Image (tube, rainbow, N blue to C red):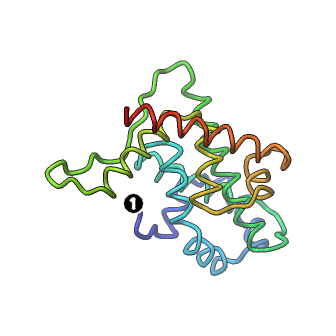
């Protein structure tokens, strides 16, 4: 997992043609505000991306891309929650864009590192089972479950992040939980 990403690395992919857009974007958020926001949100966002992708290295790349797009995005935010939800929506789109680009190519979901089998730690076994089950869910179901239960986002926040209607979130979460339960039951059988 990432410890701290230097601010200069966040924008390493910025092209010369982007410099004007970046200067305009700075008016919406100062460098210090951006750094503080990054410190508050980078770990939860990385965990979200790692869960969606199943790949820690890919999550690092997507984290950088999400912050880069967020930094370039000029917006006036109503609140810290609105700013955070926008960042998560951008990150979700980064993952979806990558999935579209590699559509047609076969990808193997990578679970977290396998646990050390010499010590049967129940907590590690549960984490591994959950990681395997999450990797078998549809990407949209992983997004829903992670935002609702790991991030504690409200239905309205989830709807805003994923671009769905608020009224549909409850039913979608119910289906995702049922599928997760079915997968977990199959794993223990």
Q: Is 4 displayed left or right of 7 in the figure?
A: left
Q: Quadrant of residue 39?
A: bottom right
Number of marks in the rendered image: 1
Q: Position of residue 104 (x, y in %)?
A: 54, 18
Q: Position of residue 56 (x, y in %)?
A: 41, 49
**Residue ID at (61%, 61%):** 151
The residue positioned farthest toward the left in the image shown: 118
**113 shown above or below 6:** above
Front position in the image: 103 or 160: 160
Q: Quadrant of residue 164?
A: top right
Camera-side residue of 93 and 26: 93
Q: Nearer the viewer, residue 174 or 38?
A: 174
Give the farthest residue toward the front.
Answer: 189
| Residue at 59%, 29% in the rendered image | 101
Instruction: Determine the residue located farthest toward the bottom in the rendered image.
Output: 32
Q: Position of residue 102 (x, y in %)?
A: 54, 27
In the rendered view, tell whether residue 35 sits above or below residue 47: below
User: Image point 17% across, 55% down: which residue?
Assistant: 119
Please give left or right for residue 145 compared with residue 157 in the image.
Answer: left
> Looking at the figure, which quarter contains the N terminus?
bottom left
Residue 144 in the image: above or below residue 72: above
Q: In the image, is residue 102 above or below residue 55?
A: above
In terms of secondary structure, where does tag 1 sit? loop
13 lies left or right of 56: right
Instruction: Pick the residue in front: 157 or 38.
Output: 157
Q: Quadrant of the C terminus?
A: top left
Where does label 1 land, which residue? Answer: 1
Q: Residues within 10 Å of mark 1 (few under 14, many from 20)?
A: few
Point 59% across, 68% down: residue: 41
């Amino acid at each position: 997992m990432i410890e701290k990403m230097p601010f200069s690395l966040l924008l390493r992919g910025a092209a010369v043609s982007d410099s004007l857009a970046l200067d305009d974007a700075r008016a919406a958020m100062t460098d210090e505000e951006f750094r503080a926001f990054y410190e508050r949100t980078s770990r939860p966002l990385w965990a979200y991306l790692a869960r969606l992708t199943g790949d820690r290295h890919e999550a690092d790349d997507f984290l950088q891309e999400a912050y880069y797009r967020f930094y370039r995005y000029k917006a006036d935010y109503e609140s810290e929650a609105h700013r955070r939800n926008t960042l998560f929506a951008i990150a979700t789109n980064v993952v979806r864009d990558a999935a579209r680009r590699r559509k047609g190519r076969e990808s193997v979901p990578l679970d977290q590192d396998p646990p050390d089998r010499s010590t049967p730690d129940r907590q590690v076994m549960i984490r591994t089972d959950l990681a395997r089950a999450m990797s078998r869910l549809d990407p949209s179901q992983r997004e829903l479950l992670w935002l609702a239960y790991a991030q504690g986002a409200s239905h309205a926040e989830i709807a805003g992040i994923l671009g769905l209607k608020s009224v549909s979130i409850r039913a979608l979460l119910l289906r995702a939980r049922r599928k997760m339960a079915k997968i977990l039951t199959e794993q223990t059988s």
